[in-house]
Amino acid sequence: MATDRNVVDWGDEPIAGWRIWNLSNDAAAPRLLPAGSGVGDVWQPMQVMTARCGVPSILKIGRRRHEAPDIGCSCGIYASRSLDESERPRPAWPPPCVVGTVALWGGVIEHEIGWRGQFAYAARLGLVCSMCAWFEPGPGVPTVVHSFAGTSYALCDVHRGGIQLQDGRRTRPTGLDPRAFQARLLDTYAVDLVPIDSVRSLFRRRRTPEPPAYVPSIRVVPVDDAP
């Protein structure tokens, strides 16, 4: 996030912002997993997300105690005004496949491109192709679901071969129908679907640049090379 602009006590009146999440591979009851800025807590269904300061204890020596968010710290639950303003560095790990909006309330600190708040809950959620949204242009609409290290990745027809890490490990197909998986996610959190048209701009952005050879990076598995 950029430099703080203002501190506002929004009380019980929420504001809406955009977020991204990773997704667990529990087909029966998928969970939103942390991604992007903020402390890495699982977003539990039907429970308010409460911000906490994640600064290591050793760095808190000599600093005043505070509740999150605090103007003198980076703590809080982050949300942006637009997904188009999010950074798109070339990833070294498979990127997230859930985008959506959250309601933020309580104490909220405003930034140039968004906010960080005290309380939050998901408002609208949707699955997108992990590679189209954060790696290279494509159709964006998921047609398969892959899994790796307990996390799910939705992929489109172009990227259905999977994602390979720099050490050769790959995501693997789960056989899950992405539409049914998405419906289960919405039911689990009792939220609405984010319209795909509201996030299509993510799928039109330029491909992330090639990093130097010594920088770890994922790559697309060609469909013909997939298991």
Image (cartoon, helix red, strand yellow):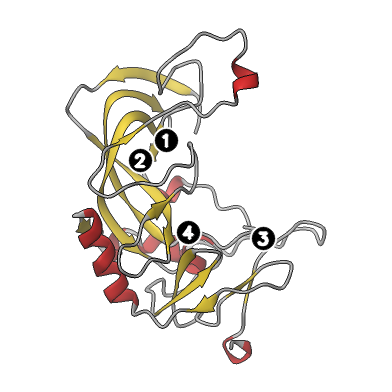
Q: Secondary structure at mark 1?
A: loop
Gap between marks 4 and 1 measured at Cα: 20 Å
Is 116 situated left or right of 169 in this image? left
* Between discs 3 and 1, the one toward the N terminus: 1
Residue drawn at point x = 43 percent, y = 30 percent: 112
Q: Which residue is mark 4?
A: 96
Q: Residues within 10 Å of mark 1 (few under 14, many from 20)?
A: some
The residue where tag 2 is placed is: 81
Relative vertical location of residue 184 with respect to residue 96 in this rendering, above or below: below
Q: Mark 1 to mark 2: distance in Å? A: 6 Å
Callout 1–callout 2 Cβ contact below 8 Å: yes
Q: Nearer the viewer, mark 3 or mark 4?
A: 4
Crowdedness near tag 4: few (<14), some (14–19) or many (≥20) residues, C-alpha within 10 Å: many
Residue 211 x, y percent position in the rendering: 74, 58
Q: Nearer the viewer, residue 90 or 39?
A: 39
Q: Determine which residue is flagged by label 1.
A: 113
Q: Residue at x 54, y 78 (%)?
A: 172
Residues at badges 3 and 1 in contact (C-beta under 8 Å)?
Answer: no
Mark closest to the chain's N terminus, 4 or 1: 4
Label tally: 4
Instruction: Say which amino acid is labelled 1.
Output: Ile
Q: CA distance from mark 3 to mark 1?
A: 24 Å
Question: Which mark, residue 209?
Answer: 3
Q: Nearer the viewer, residue 201 or 220?
A: 220
Amino acid tagged 2: Arg
- Look at label 4 and name its amino acid: Pro
Task: Looking at the image, tell me whether mark 4 or mark 2 is earlier in sequence order.
Answer: 2
Please give the name of the residue rendered at 30% of the width and 63% of the height, measured from the top-left corner: 29
Give residue 176's position: percent from left, percent from top: 37, 79
| SS label for mark 2 | loop
**Dot 1 or dot 2, earlier in sequence:** 2
